[in-house]
Amino acid sequence: MQWPRPRAVPIAAAVLAIAVLVGAGRILRDSTVEAQAPPPPQLSVYSPQTFYTVPLLTINGQPYVGLVELLEPLGTLDAKPDGKKYKLKFAPPGAREMELQFQDGKDNGKVQGDKLKLSSNFAVQNGRGFIPLSSVSELLSRSLATQIRLSPAARRLFVGNVGEKLTLDLRKGTPSKLFVSFDSPVNPTIATEPGHIRFTFRREPVIATSEHENYTDPLITGASLSEHDGIAELDVTGTSPLMANFADGGKTIVVTGAPPPPPQTVVMQTPLPQPNVPQQTALPPKAPAGPRFLVLIDPAHGGTEIGSAISPTLPEKDVVLTLARKLQHELQARGVAAGLLRNSDITITLDQRAISANAARPAIYVALHAANSGRGVHVFTPLVDPANLSSRDFLPWETAQAAYLDLSTAVAGSVAAEMESRKLPNTALAAPLRPMNNIAAPAIAVEIASPSETVEDIGSTAYLDQVAQAIAAGIAAMRGKVPEVRP
Amino acid sequence: MTRPIVLMFVVLLLAAAGLGFYAYHLKAKVAAEEQRLAQQSQVVVPPASGPTTLVTLYVASDQEGGLRRSSVNVALPQERSERARAILRALLGAYLQADSQHPIGAGSDVRDIFLMGSDTAVVDTNAAFADAHPSGVLAEELTIASMVTTLNANDPQITQVKILVDGKERDTLAGHADLRRFYKSTGIGQILKDTP
């Protein structure tokens, strides 16, 4: 046996020490909670019916999109993962049902029997099918038979004949004014700082061409429109602080100089997730809008909070988001304005939900839940101590609902009656369910359970359609009985 | 290679080995604790010794969406809070049975009950009660309603109940039912109807 040379001993010791340290680090890392990853990027989808976002997943270094998340808001969908095979039945509104078929690890699929070549392999993860983002345009144009415009770099997708083009018109004077005009009302988020005013269009399908205007004006020096990260952004530059006003019912934004004295640097940003409803603008329109009947739908949970595990591959957060989108469609079909508090897989705290809901000033708030036990539909009204009834001018946070309890009960009764008339097993109860007690509007919660012994049936298209129609009919029947609210 | 350098490497090696051993020990300890908690699946039952008393339990049923009244014999201690704890443990024991109509997480237990004044009970449950509780609005409300109603039925002076988890306040039981509030027995009537 030969002993190692003397110089080799410390080197071996050092290597061993490093290996032990690395191993200890791994053990400790495994024993601790993993650091939360930053939120995944999202694809903004604009269609004539709706706007929604779809999370993007990076697979083999490429962005992928979940098929169900992408197609569900665009029609009725029934996905059937079968091992490596992934089949979907998809029916756009007013069109015949078609079959889509893909296979994990294969770069070709079929749309109604016709071959579809993907830019890279289809992927199935946790029972969900994902296609490469760059193939989304081809898939949708085949499935929907309509014009599709995809901007992969900006992560924006336009389905059909949507798209809002703007025109810029600088009118020189004292002070000069830049008129930014749109075909329909817009409601961007506005951020200002000295020399800049930025308009962020997240929900509006504003199409950003390579527009960049330079002006020879003592106040407004330029305007550029760009798109990135799922948004379009208009940046107007000036030699002094700028401000904006809305005109023509929100179709025109007028940018001009801010009155003296020059304000401090102010960035108006909303820290909380905004509901998918007309936003509060940073600078309100001159003419106050009239009262409206807006229903705010709150699909519970989302993001890291999955809610109940209906099945190993079907979390509550997905079921309620599907139901929420169907409910929104059903309400809109009945002429009722409806917005979603969450339209993608994001985490929102209970307090954030209440804050966003109260800021949206809905006529009715509907929270949606799903359970993996019990049967049928449960309609809940808030459980608030009547002794806490207080003025509507200033409401305590914990009992803000108290002043609206009678209306909430009436809405729940109307929804339960619709369930009954459609032979849907239902129970009407009161429950201290957060954040209902913090909502300053008539509020109900609807929890669905499976209609049969098979718990997965809770996600069946027919069942969700039936529930959504019943809720929508119950709410629509309350129009005229529940006061409209001024935004 | 000088002697100090060799010594430094030896010390470093020993320190690294010690750290590695400590980390391994920590991991093994955590794993053992988790395994012990997971194995706490035995049905919680009140003490079997001593004279028994007929107590009323309001037992939840997921299928019916309500509470069903039943009576069982339970050996009850003399002290009031201990009696309340024994009654609630009997209730949780019913939920932990294999044929329960309202199953809850294995190992669920009531650690303690504190009586504040004559009308308020603060029920301190263990972590398994909340962590392993089925998630759902109705399922969670039924559990809470059955606990409050059962306490009130056997000790009518107890009219409001607060539920803690491992000695601490928690936002919700399993994502839905509000645990920050006091539950009044009179309010429970609004939540559920007795289905005897």
Image: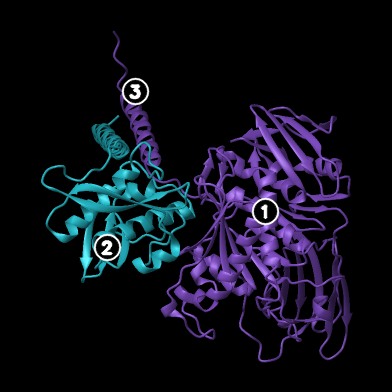
Chain colours: A purple, B cyan
Q: Is residue B43 above or below residue A264?
A: above
Front: mark 2 or 1: 1
Front: mark 3 or 1: 1
Residue A283 in picture, x, y percent from top left: 70, 81
The residue that disc 3 covers is: A8
User: Label 2: chain?
Assistant: B
Q: Residue at (33%, 61%) from the top-left corner?
A: B169
Task: Indicate the quadrant containing the N terminus of chain A: top left, top right, bottom left or bottom right.
Answer: top left
Three-letter amino acid code of the residue under disc 2: Val
Q: Residue furthest top?
A: A1
Are the residues tagged 2 and 1 within 8 Å (C-beta)?
no
Q: Which of the 4 image quarters holds residue A229?
A: bottom right
Q: CA distance from mark 3 to mark 2?
A: 66 Å
Q: CA distance from mark 2 to mark 1?
A: 43 Å
User: Label 1: chain?
Assistant: A
Disc 3 element: helix
Q: CA distance from mark 3 to mark 1?
A: 83 Å
The one of B90 and A131 positioned closer to us in this rendering: B90
Task: Indicate the quadrant containing the C terminus of chain A: top left, top right, bottom left or bottom right.
Answer: bottom right
Disc 2 element: strand
Can you see residue A264? yes
Q: Residue furthest front?
A: B196
Q: Residue at (55%, 40%) from the top-left corner?
A: A455
The residue that disc 1 covers is: A422
Are the residues tagged 3 and 2 within 8 Å (C-beta)?
no
The residue that disc 2 covers is: B122
Q: Which of the 4 image quarters holds residue A484?
A: bottom right
Q: Count residues near mark 3 (Cα–Cα under 10 Å), then give few for <14, some for 14-19, many for 20+.
A: few
Residue B5 tag number: none
